[in-house]
Amino acid sequence: MRLLTHNMLSSNIKGVTNGFPLRIEVEKVVEKEVDLNPDFLRSMFSKIDWKALVHAARSIGYSELPDEADPSMLDSDDFLSRFHHALLQLHLEEGVLICPETGRRFPVNKGIPNMLLHEDEV
Amino acid sequence: MSSRPELQAPPEIFYDDDEARKYTSSSRIIKIQSELTERALELLALPDDGVPRLLLDIGCGSGLSGETLSEKGHEWIGLDISQSMLNVALEREVEGDLLLRDMGQGLGFRPGVIDGAISISAIQWLCNADKSSHEPRRRLKAFFGSLYRCLARGARAVFQVYPENLDQRVLILNFAMLAGFSGGVVVDYPHSAKKRKEYLVLTCGPPSVSTSAPKEDGESYSDDESSGDDENQTVCVSDRHRPRKKQRMMKKGKGREWVLKKKEQMRRRGNYVPADTKYTARKRKARF
Ligand SMILES: C[S@@+](CC[C@H](N)C(=O)[O-])C[C@H]1O[C@@H](n2cnc3c(N)ncnc32)[C@H](O)[C@@H]1O
């Protein structure tokens, strides 16, 4: 799972009012190189919760994102390549996603988060 | 269409390792699923600007539909309830991210962040109650509600679906409308039982003038089907805004039998209908 997906994902356990962002516990991260598409990054930027991205990137060992970001930075190649790397090239391969409100743990195996809820959670 | 898989076992049981492999190694299935996905993508009517979008593939399975999304350059998140299907998707090294997730439990994404959603041959599974705790109506409601919330305003969701019958289609559409979607059904090859394909095309929010109505597939069509007229590949769009039949004034009441029949019909559609009693459709006295 890439941080792009992590940035969209929120815990929807019954009764949880703010399930975002899920905390990350890391066992293994892998890097996969993909082409950088500036248009995609620019169109995604407004939808990204930047703080959550910075935090998530840090928790999987990448600290090269600026704490704050605004659209004007999308003109900088250097910024784009860091944004690209954090969003699309780092994969949480093994680990756990943790609901910020309930502490419920969603295991991640082979890059796939198990988000199935128990019956009393829906 | 001899046996419907949905009626055999819950999806996570039906799509076990064997079935997942069988499904994904059939070149016929691969071809069909990718054609269905291309059509769904066309109906999604994304802006034609070459910018990749973030899409959902609901019931992504082994990634056949997702691979078509990647070919068109889009980023996608796929979710499926079958670990076996997702394992095959991993083997195929699909480019999208995968989630093990039951769509009937709601999707769990932040509001307004997704540019569009497709679902190929999957949603009819939601109409079954596979566990005693499963209430199709509740699951459909949770699903469409969560889908509506996570889509950007004006975004579309396109479901290629094999409804078991008319009632099932109505049930699905009802819950989509209840969640706030507008839209309707597109039917390709309506005259051919074999090739007939049905898509629910839903728009998040009221229909806007800028989203064009789905156009018929321009593909030439000269197969074994006999009728050679231009009705060949009609695409009909219907929605709930079509004019209702004018209510006819009835001098006499419709009678108990008619009321019971209607109530039964509504029940089959999954609507809540009060129980039949001796008072049902009883004539009122002429005075107050
Ligand atoms: C016929 S396959 C289609 C897979 C893929 N979309 C394709 O085109 O090849 C249907 C898929 O829907 C999935 N499915 C059924 N019910 C589901 C549910 N409640 N939540 C998520 N996925 C489900 C099944 O596990 C299966 O992989």
Image: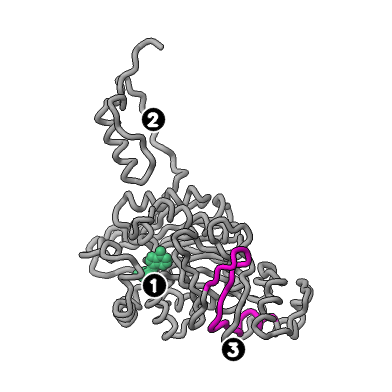
Q: Which of B264 and A22 is in front in this view?
A: A22
Q: Quadrant of residue A74?
A: bottom right
Which mark, by number, is residue B82?
A: 1
Q: In which quarter of the image is residue B219?
A: bottom left
Residue B9 visible, this angle: yes
Left or right: where B181 falls relative to B192: right
Q: Quadrant of residue B189?
A: bottom left
Callouts 3 and 2 on one subunit: no
Which mark, by number, is residue B247?
A: 2
- Position of B47 relative to B91 (above/below): above
In the rendered structure, are the residues bearing label 2 and label 1 in contact, judged by CB atoms less than 8 Å apart?
no
Residue located beneath label 3 in the image:
A31
Please state the horizontal and vertical placement of residue A13, each as a whole percent of the image: 54, 61
Say if the magenta span includes residue A109.
Answer: no
Please state the horizontal and vertical placement of residue B70, each as a whole percent of the image: 50, 78
Which mark, by number, is residue B44?
A: none
Residue B220 visible, this angle: no
Residue drawn where x is 26% and y is 70% of the image: B223
Left or right: where A2 falls relative to B101: right
Callouts 2 and 1 on one subunit: yes
Say which label, 2 or 1, has the lower sequence index.
Answer: 1
